[in-house]
Image: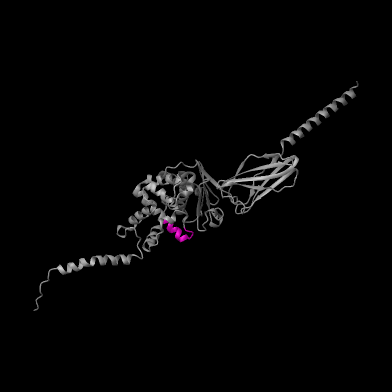
C-alpha cells in the first residue's frame, strides 16, 4: 500500500470521527434543550419608566417560548411575563416591565429568572439573580460602619460623616428601649431636594411626607439639603425617626404592619434627638378646642391632611411618653410583642398594659389635661361644666349668708 493511499485513508477516518463527534454533540445539545448564551443586567432609568430585561438563547429545535419571572419583597405573588423574540435556533428575547403592570419598590432587591422552551417542549430555567432597584439618576457617595450605610449625592465627606454619626446614635437609642435584634444591613438614602425624592417617596402615599422607611429591605429615605441652615436640626429629627420604624419592625417580626400607627409613630417621634418645637402648642390647642383625635382612629394610617397628621404625630408621642412614664419601658416591649403575636389594636393594649384602648385614652387625657377635667378634653363643654359647679355650690353660699352673724350697727355722728 502506497503512503498516499494510507494518508487518504487516515484523513477519511479522521473526518468520519469528526462527523461522528459533531453528530453526537448535536444530538446531545438537542436532547439537552435550549442553551442560555447571555443575560445582561436589567436596564432602566429610575423614576417611573420601564425596566428592560434581555436574554440570548439558542436551541437546535429552535427557541419557541421565553418567560420572565420577577419577585420583590413587598409582594408575595410572582410576576410572570412573556418576552418578545423572533423564533429560530437563536433568539434575542426582550421584556419591558412597565410600572403600571408591576411597580418595583425604590431601593428594593429584585429577584428574577427565565424559562426558555424549545420546539420539542424541552425547558431550561436559569439561576435566580438579584439586582438593587436603586436611583441611578445620581452618583451616590457612601459611608459604612458595620451594617449601617449612608448614601448621598450632594455634599462633602464631612456631611456624610455627620449623617452616619446621627444614624448610628439614633439606631442605638431606639434599640436601647425596645431591645430588638438589629437588622443585618440598613441604608439611609439622603436626597437634597423634594423634587428629587418624589419617586423614592411614592410608596409612602402622602404628598407631604419628607421621609420613609422600608423595613422589608432595610432602606430609609430622607430629604436633607447639605447647605441649609436648618439641616443639622432636621437631620437629628428625621433620620432617627425613620430608623425607629426599622427597629420596631425588627421587634414585631413579620407582623410589623399590625403595629398601630399611634405606637409606631409615637416611638419614632420620641426617638427624635431634636423634637418638633411646635408639637406641645399644637396638642394644647387641640385639647382646648376639644379636637383631640380618638386613639382608635390612630390605629391605622394617619389622616391624609398634613395639619391633622401633624396633630396625630404630636398626640401619639404624648401617649407613648405617658405609657413609658406610667408603666415603664418594659411595657412598650410587651406591646410590640403582643402585636407580633397578631393581636389587634385594642387587644394588644389589653395584653401589654392590662386595660382597654378606651381606658388608656381616658388615663392619658386625665393625666395630660388635668384631674379637674376628668377624661374630657377642654373646649365646648367647659362653660356648661362651670355653670354646673356654680349650681351645685349655690346652696352652700346661701346657707353661709343666712347663718352669718349680724354686723354691729354703725354710729352716725
Residue in the foreground of this view, choosing between 50 and 198: 50
Does the segment drawn in magenta span residue 278?
no
What segment carries the magenta color? Answer: 303-314
| Horizontal relation, residue 303 to residue 326: left or right | right
Q: Residue furthest right?
A: 2
Residue toward you, 238 or 259: 259
In this rendering, is residue 29 above or below 149? Answer: above
Image location (x, y in percent) of residue 355: 36, 50
Q: Quadrant of the N terminus?
A: top right
**In the image, farthest residue toward the top:** 1
> Which quadrant of the structure image shows residue 387?
bottom left
Q: Position of residue 67 (x, y in %)?
A: 67, 45
Q: Is residue 273 visible?
A: no
Q: Is residue 310 above or below residue 251?
A: below
* Quadrant that contains the C terminus: bottom left
- The percent coordinates of residue 238 (x first, y second) are 47, 52
Number of marks present in the image shown: 0
Residue at the location (25% across, 65% down)? 392
Q: Mark yes or no: residue 353 visible.
A: yes
Q: Is residue 312 magenta?
A: yes
Q: Nearer the viewer, residue 317 or 383?
A: 383
Residue 3: x and y in percent read 89, 22
Q: Left or right of 328: which side holds 65? A: right
Amino acid at each position: 500500500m502506497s503512503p498516499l493511499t494510507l494518508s487518504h485513508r487516515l484523513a477519511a477516518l479522521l473526518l468520519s470521527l469528526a462527523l461522528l463527534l459533531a453528530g453526537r454533540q448535536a444530538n446531545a445539545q438537542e436532547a439537552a434543550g435550549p442553551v442560555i448564551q447571555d443575560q445582561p443586567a436589567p436596564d432602566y432609568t429610575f423614576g417611573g419608566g420601564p425596566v428592560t430585561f434581555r436574554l440570548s438563547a439558542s436551541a437546535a429545535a429552535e427557541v419557541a417560548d421565553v418567560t420572565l419571572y420577577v419577585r420583590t419583597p413587598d409582594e408575595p405573588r410572582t410576576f410572570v411575563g412573556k418576552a418578545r423574540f423572533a423564533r429560530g435556533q437563536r433568539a434575542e428575547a426582550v421584556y419591558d416591565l412597565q410600572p403600571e403592570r408591576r411597580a418595583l419598590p425604590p431601593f428594593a432587591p429584585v429577584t428574577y429568572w427565565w424559562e426558555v422552551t424549545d420546539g420539542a417542549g424541552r425547558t431550561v430555567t436559569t439561576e435566580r439573580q438579584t439586582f438593587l432597584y436603586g436611583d441611578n439618576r445620581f452618583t451616590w457617595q457612601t459611608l459604612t460602619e458595620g451594617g449601617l450605610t449612608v448614601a448621598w449625592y450632594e455634599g462633602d465627606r464631612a456631611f456624610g460623616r455627620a449623617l452616619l454619626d446621627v444614624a448610628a446614635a439614633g439606631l442605638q437609642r431606639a434599640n436601647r428601649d425596645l431591645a430588638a435584634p438589629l437588622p443585618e444591613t440598613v441604608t439611609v438614602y439622603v436626597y437634597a431636594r423634594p423634587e428629587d425624592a418624589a419617586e423614592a417617596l411614592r410608596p409612602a402615599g402622602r404628598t407631604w411626607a419628607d421621609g420613609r422607611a422600608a423595613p422589608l429591605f432595610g432602606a430609609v429615605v430622607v430629604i436633607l439639603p447639605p447647605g441649609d441652615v436648618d439641616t443639622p436640626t432636621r437631620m437629628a429629627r428625621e433620620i432617627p425617626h425613620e430608623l425607629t420604624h426599622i427597629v420596631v419592625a425588627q421587634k414585631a417580626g413579620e407582623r410589623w404592619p399590625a403595629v398601630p400607627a399611634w405606637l409606631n409613630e409615637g416611638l419614632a417621634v420620641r426617638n427624635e434627638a431634636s423634637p418638633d418645637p411646635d408639637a406641645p402648642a399644637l396638642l394644647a390647642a387641640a385639647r382646648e378646642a376639644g379636637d383631640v383625635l380618638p386613639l382608635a382612629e390612630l390605629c391605622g394610617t394617619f389622616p391624609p391632611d398634613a395639619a391633622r397628621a401633624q396633630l396625630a404625630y404630636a398626640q401619639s408621642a404624648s401617649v407613648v411618653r405617658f405609657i413609658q412614664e406610667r408603666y415603664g419601658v418594659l411595657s412598650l416591649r410587651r406591646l410590640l410583642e403582643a402585636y407580633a403575636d397578631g393581636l389587634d389594636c385594642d387587644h394588644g393594649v389589653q395584653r401589654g398594659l392590662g386595660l382597654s384602648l378606651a381606658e388608656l385614652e381616658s388615663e392619658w387625657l386625665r393625666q395630660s389635661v388635668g384631674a379637674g377635667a376628668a377624661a374630657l378634653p377642654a373646649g365646648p363643654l367647659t362653660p356648661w361644666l362651670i355653670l354646673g359647679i356654680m349650681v351645685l355650690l349655690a346652696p352652700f353660699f346661701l346657707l353661709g349668708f343666712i347663718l352669718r352673724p349680724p354686723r354691729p350697727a354703725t354710729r352716725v355722728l
